[in-house]
Amino acid sequence: MNLKDKVCIVTGAAGGIGRAIAARYVAEGAKVAIADLKAEDAVATAKALTEAGPGEAIGVTMDVTQEAAVNEGVAAVVERFGRVDVLVANAGIQIVHKVEEFPFEDWKRMLSIHLDGAFLTTKACIPHMKAQGGGAVIYMGSVHSHEASPLKSAYVTAKHGLLGLARVVAKEGGAHGIRANVICPGFVRTPLVEKQIPEQAKTLGISEEEVVNRVMLGNTVDTEFTTLEDVAEVALFFAGFETNALTGQSLNVSHGWSMR
């Protein structure tokens, strides 16, 4: 799983899961682009990770819903490092509502960030991967790529969609050495999940403790949250697995929440 000097782009990498993956890659000696909507956060994260070493990180401003911004960001990475070996399409948000109460604008925003973002970054990186003879495309799915939960119609739809995109990229990219995989974490206690706890408690009419113990962890085998480190290790595994043997596959990282 040697990533030394490999060039990696991680979207949504200024915090949460994206930052954990970027940090793991830098620790392996990779050159990592911290692609994030907020320029200051991207630059600050890149500086901190570079100081930790031994790899290198740079900050890249990127709105993954805008094709021009994605293309400019990827071009900047290639100009700096000469290639793209790994793409981790991680950028995402969460909005919860019942289906009949889901604002259409929020629905479109959710699908744009999760699905359009994955598509546009993939589209921008594939030509570079083809030219250099291969690469890894990794999508941040969820247990909700395989399962469903109340209040998450847009999120579940988007995460299911990433499975289809990965499988098409795997089919089209196989002859060029391009692999595609989906990581499917369970609940990771990031700010995104912390925000959901009171929202779901209010909507479902239960306590926040019940949201955590019953809704989020009730289906796990050990009532434990998935950790950032758990997900980062799987991202390292997929990035460094340089054959087509596992391409098109998804992997649940959920403490047994989902076993598909």
Image (spheres, rainbow, N blue to C red):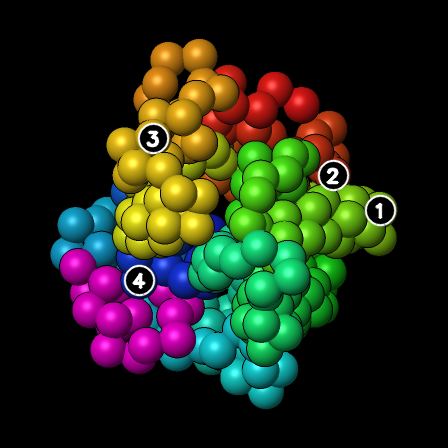
- The answer to whether residue 136 of the structure is visible from this angle is no
- Tell me if label 1 and label 4 are in contact, CB under 8 Å: no
Q: Which residue is mark 2?
A: 248
Mark 3 is surrounded, within 10 Å at the Cα level, by few (under 14), some (14 to 19) or many (20 or more) other residues, namely some
Q: Nearer the viewer, mark 3 or mark 1?
A: 3
- Which residues are drawn in magenta? 33-48
Please state the horizontal and vertical placement of residue 153, each as a whole percent of the image.
63, 53
- Residues at marks 2 and 4, CA–CA distance in whole angstroms: 27 Å
Q: Nearer the viewer, mark 2 or mark 3?
A: 3
Q: What residue does disc 4 label?
A: 14
Tag 1–tag 2 contact (CB < 8 Å): yes
Would you say the residues marked 2 and 4 are in contact, meaning their CB atoms lie under 8 Å apart?
Answer: no
Q: Which residue is mark 1?
A: 171
Q: Residues within 10 Å of mark 1 (few under 14, many from 20)?
A: some
Q: Is residue 64 left or right of residue 212?
A: right
Provide residue 106's location: percent of width, then percent of height: 55, 71
Residue 166, given in percent of the width and then of the height, sits at 72, 48
User: Which callout, 3 or 1, points at the residue further toward the start of the chain?
Assistant: 1
Let me know if residue 177 is in the magenta part: no
Above-or-below relation of 163 to 101:
above
- In this picture, residue 256 sits left or right of residue 68: left
CA separation in Å, label 3 and label 1: 42 Å
Q: Earlier in the sequence, mark 1 or mark 2?
A: 1
Task: Label 1: state its secondary structure.
Answer: helix
Q: Earlier in the sequence, mark 2 or mark 3?
A: 3
**Which residue is under mark 3?**
210
Label 4 secondary element: loop
- Circle 1: residue type: Lys
Residue beneath the point at 56% across and 29% down: 252
> For numbered disc 2, what is the local secondary structure?
loop
The spot of residue 114 in percent (x, y) is 58, 61
Around disc 2, counting alpha carbons within 10 Å, would you say few (fewer than 14), some (14 to 19), or many (20 or more)? many
